Image (cartoon, rainbow, N blue to C red):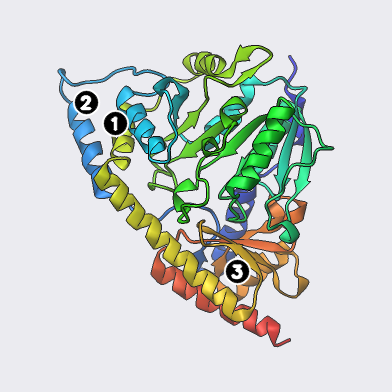
Amino acid sequence: MNINHNFQNVADSYLFSTIAKKVAEYQQENPKADIIRLGIGDVTMPLVPAVIEALHGAVDEMGKKETFHGYGPEQGYGFLKEALKGYYAQRGIELDGDEIFVSDGAKSDVGNILNLFSQDNTVLVPDPVYPVYVDTNIMDGRKILYMNANADNGFLPLPDPAVKADLIYLCSPNNPTGAVYSHAQLKQWVDYANENHAVILFDAAYEAFVGDKSLPRSIFEIDGARTCAIEFCSLSKTAGFTGTRCGYTVVPFDLESDGVKLNKMWLRRQTTKFNGVPYIVQKGAAAVFSDEGQKQSHQVIGYYKQNAKVIADALKELGVWFTGGEHSPYIWLQCPNGMASWDFFDLLLKEGNVVGTPGAGFGKNGEGFFRLTAFNDLENTRKAVERIKKVLSSLQAI
């Protein structure tokens, strides 16, 4: 019996597990410390009333023989897919229901989609990058190329014609940097992918945070994307489903590789390896896209964006370079005085009792940077900002 030795090339600990361990050790040594977490991207606001009402209704249905639901369609119930079609149509994107696949979250599908592609494909990812893109490909043994995202290009790298890749990971609004691609920038990527017969794996998990109508929220707003892109979306951040679990992936009929339609392949994969998202959860998810659900969800997103503004305003006041925070729940800041990311993490934890995420955990280009999230409540965010200002001010005085 042989194991998959590619796993030996993956870091022993996932980034956020390392952070959790360090925070737990500090808390144990300092039990009275009032630690505020602005690190992991987990939400704190509850599910909105429209969703709760739908969930309760679905639970009641499951308690009656006449309305009970057993196994459902692996790719999602029609009522949710119709709601998603309407959501995309608001932005002029026409989808067929069979192009939409409901999942238990974007993270799962971002990894599982690799079942469709051979191990000899070359993968192109930005650096810094959401670790899941890298780790899942290392586990499969693929060659990974990194494109430099940095302050000079606004952490939004563009295609290099001299670099050839088969799979391209893009995330906008970006995790971890909060940067957002324009239509013109995404058009360059779509043209590159079509010219090179590559597939863009587009992570749109934070699309609902985009407030500027001139900025794209879906790769399918770009002409030509249907022949080169797959889009992954999640309700985790847009509707507070981090613990409820629901997302969706769009695989267009037009997307082919080696003469095979990837939509058909993904359907076969899902019907073989996935039993679908629970009916109750899908009823709650459908409520997100109702008029009332959208209104309530946007209010929650507005709350988080207010938190982001509180953080951003403080950094501007101190003259700290950062990106994100406007169309994203993430603020990506430059560590003070040339500090290393993990050194700043330790300093902020010990001197300010605030937890963030070291940029180095997202790749070599993340060294010297630090990510803060806007997902705590407003009171804690304001308290954390005052502590951060105190720590940064003390460093500036040195």
**Alpha-carbon span between mark 1 and mark 3:** 40 Å
Q: List x then y, in percent, for residue 368.
A: 74, 63
Q: Which residue corresponds to mark 2? A: 62
Sequence-first tag of 2 and 1: 2
Q: List x then y, in percent, for residue 69.
A: 26, 20
> Is residue 33 visible in the rendered structure shown here?
no
Please state which amino acid type lies under the numbered disc 3.
Answer: Leu
Quadrant for residue 392, please give it.
Answer: bottom right
Is 146 situated left or right of 264 in this image? right
Sequence-first tag of 3 and 2: 2
**Alpha-carbon span between mark 3 and mark 2:** 46 Å
**In the depicted view, which residue is nearer to us: 42 or 212?**
212
Query: Image point 68% across, 34% down: which residue?
Result: 191
Q: Which residue corresponds to mark 3? A: 349
Q: Secondary structure at mark 3?
A: helix
Please state which amino acid type lies under the numbered disc 1.
Answer: Ile
Give the quarter of the figure containing the N terminus.
top right
Q: List x then y, in percent, for residue 129.
A: 67, 47
Q: Mark 2 Cα within 10 Å, few/some/many (few <14, many 20+)?
A: some
Sequence-first tag of 1 and 3: 1
Assess whether mark 2 and mark 3 are in contact (beta carbons under 8 angstroms).
no
Q: Mark 1 Cα within 10 Å, few/some/many (few <14, many 20+)?
A: some
Please state which amino acid type lies under the numbered disc 2.
Answer: Met
Query: Image point 48% across, 68% down: which residue?
Result: 309
Q: Secondary structure at mark 2?
A: helix
Q: Secondary structure at mark 1?
A: helix
**Alpha-carbon span between mark 2 and mark 1:** 8 Å
> Is residue 27 visible in the rendered structure shown here?
yes
Assess whether mark 1 and mark 2 are in contact (beta carbons under 8 angstroms).
yes
Is 174 situated left or right of 210 in this image? right
Q: List x then y, in percent, for residue 52.
A: 25, 43
The disc at residue 280 is: 1
